[in-house]
Image (cartoon, helix red, strand yellow):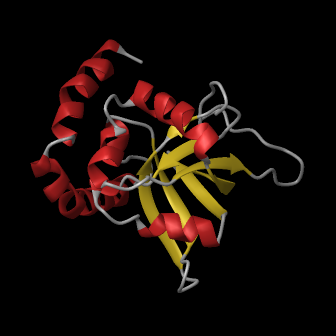
Amino acid sequence: MSAVLSLVRSAVAPLTRTRLFRATAPALLPPAERFLERISRGRLQLSALLVPSLVLRSTGARSGLPRETRLMYTPDGDGRAIVAGTSFARARHPAWTYNLMTHPDAEIVVRGRRLSVRASLIGPAGRDAAWDRIECQWPGYRGYERDSGRVVRMFLLRPVAERGTLSVPWVGTGPTV
């Protein structure tokens, strides 16, 4: 990670743990993300300036309709990604977690590139390792779980190989959860 990015993250991370951020971000960030996505044709995300970000394309748990959600992710090697349903420390699980539990086959888009994935819920045995990995990227992120009063759902997104080939160098590498 570059020194500038590290400095920016260390300055911004504490702000994301404030009540003001948690109260305003759910209303302000999605429209800002959509605007940036529109003008960059899907290549930039506001959140991606600080942390790796993706667009999750899933199927609605109850409606069956296509859904898109912008999420922070943590690379986990071989094209895998960890996502955590923190929802700004709200008391309820975010809708996208229900979607993945009902329909684990999904698609992610990272910097304009699409990849089919299969989601699996990270169980109790892997949670601490997953949180450690996430917090290497964004210190204090597990605080959202403590403040929400619930056990945050965490998923490992694994690439689904199509036609026997798989090449995803843009997702990142690292040890497995």
In the rendered image, is residue 130 in sight?
A: yes
Outermost residue on the bottom side: it is 63
Quarter of the figure with residue 142: top left
In this rendering, the count of numbered labels is 0
Outermost residue on the top side: it is 3
Quarter of the figure with residue 23: bottom left
Q: Nearer the viewer, residue 106 or 128?
A: 128
Residue at 58% across, 65% down: 100
What is the x, y in percent for residue 30? 28, 61
Say which quadrant the N terminus sits in: top left
* Left or right: residue 19 compared with residue 96: left
Q: Is residue 162 above or below residue 4?
A: below
What is the x, y in percent for residue 118? 69, 56
In the rendered image, is residue 46 in sight?
A: no
What is the x, y in percent for residue 153? 49, 54
Q: Is residue 77 above or below residue 44?
A: above
Q: Is residue 139 above or below residue 110?
A: above
* Left or right: residue 21 compared with residue 133: left
What is the x, y in percent for residue 48? 38, 41
